[in-house]
Amino acid sequence: MKKITHAVIPVAGFGTRMLPLSKSVPKELLPLGNRPAIHYVVEEAIAAGIKHIVLVGHAQKSAIENYFDINAELDNQLRHKGKDELADSLNWLPKDVTVSMIRQGKALGLGHAVLASRPIIGEHDFAVLLPDVVLDPFTNDMTVNNLAFMIDAFTKDNHSQILVNKVADEDVHKYGIAQLHEEFSATSAFEDQAEVNISFKVAGFVEKPSLADAPSKLAVVGRYVFSNQIFDYLANTIASVGGEIQLTDAIDALISEYGVNVTTMRGDSYDAGDMRSYMQAFIYFAEQQLKDDE
């Protein structure tokens, strides 16, 4: 059985919802507690077994690539001062994990960003992690839950997986909402089980519906595991309004041809790309880390 070892993290967005914080600092490098937000996302990928992470960015996001590189001058200076433990903590990536960066070129949507990773991903199946979404690392075992569970489920049945979570009525219109097959129409059996991951087939998705039109309350969270075939669908997807290539259009084509599963999320997630949610997340992460230091 093929094990997924590649992941794509799109980081090309300007982060306008996070201005003025993101004016000169990439939003992915804004701190959650004592680490940048993207640090937790990459740690999650590594815990799930990912060995090659592809960042899809643009010219103004080189600071993200630098964060995952070794700063030899800083490393030497710290070790010269006897701060070996601090120097080691900065070079935290495992030796068998590679982080690459490729540029998207044009801002043509999430689907285009994922497609831009194809020269590096090649023929591999792969995961996609949206960096605005940070899953709670303090109450979850990332080696078995959520992304790790999705990768294992994909390995078993070869169905692409999309992470979903129940959202409040007033938030339904903000997300892509899962449309379930008839056999799963009693969604409460899945929507209320936040303590376990469950994978089941999905009929499609409705993008940002009103509550009245929503087929469920299961919203896409920002974690995907894709068969490599998604690249062919993305390459043939016609740009929609605004000239963007939508990932959801390619997913719909994948559903009709091969079938796709959704996986219910275990634990909590935080939107690090929205100012209010980000500030709440920062407080939570800082509190957890201060508690660990006591």
Image (cartoon, rainbow, N blue to C red):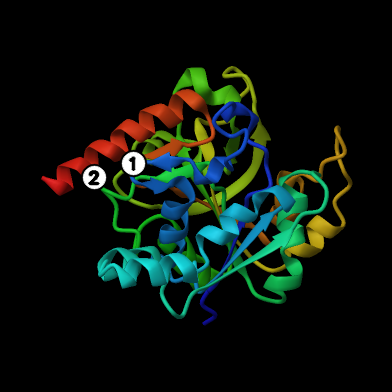
Q: Which residue lies at the image location 63% right of the left edge and 45% below the top edge?
A: 203
| Residue 33 - label | 1
**Where does residue 202 sit, x and y in percent of width and height?**
58, 48
**Where does residue 151 sit, x and y in percent of width and height?**
48, 66
Q: Which residue lies at the image location 71% right of the left edge and 77% below the top edge?
A: 123
**Where does residue 146 sit, x and y in percent of width and height?**
41, 55
Residue type, mark 1 in image: Gly
All told, the count of numbered labels is 2
Q: Which residue lies at the image location 30% right of the left edge and 63% below the top edge?
A: 86
Q: Based on the displayed image, in which of its 4 quarters is residue 75 positioned?
A: bottom left
Label 2 belongs to which residue? 289
Residue 23 is left or right of residue 267, and the answer is right
Going from the N terminus, do you reach mark 2 or mark 1 first?
1
Does residue 96 appear in the picture of this structure?
yes
Residue type, mark 2 in image: Gln
Query: For the residue carrying disc 1, how many other residues have a C-alpha within 10 Å: few (<14), some (14-19), or many (20+)?
Result: some
Distance between mark 2 and mark 1 Cα atoms: 7 Å
Q: For this rendering, which residue is in front, 194 or 37?
A: 37
Residues under numbered marks 2 and 1 in contact, where contact means CB atoms less than 8 Å apart = yes
Q: For this rendering, which residue is in front, 13 or 239?
A: 13
Q: Which residue lies at the image location 87% right of the left edge and 43% below the top edge?
A: 239
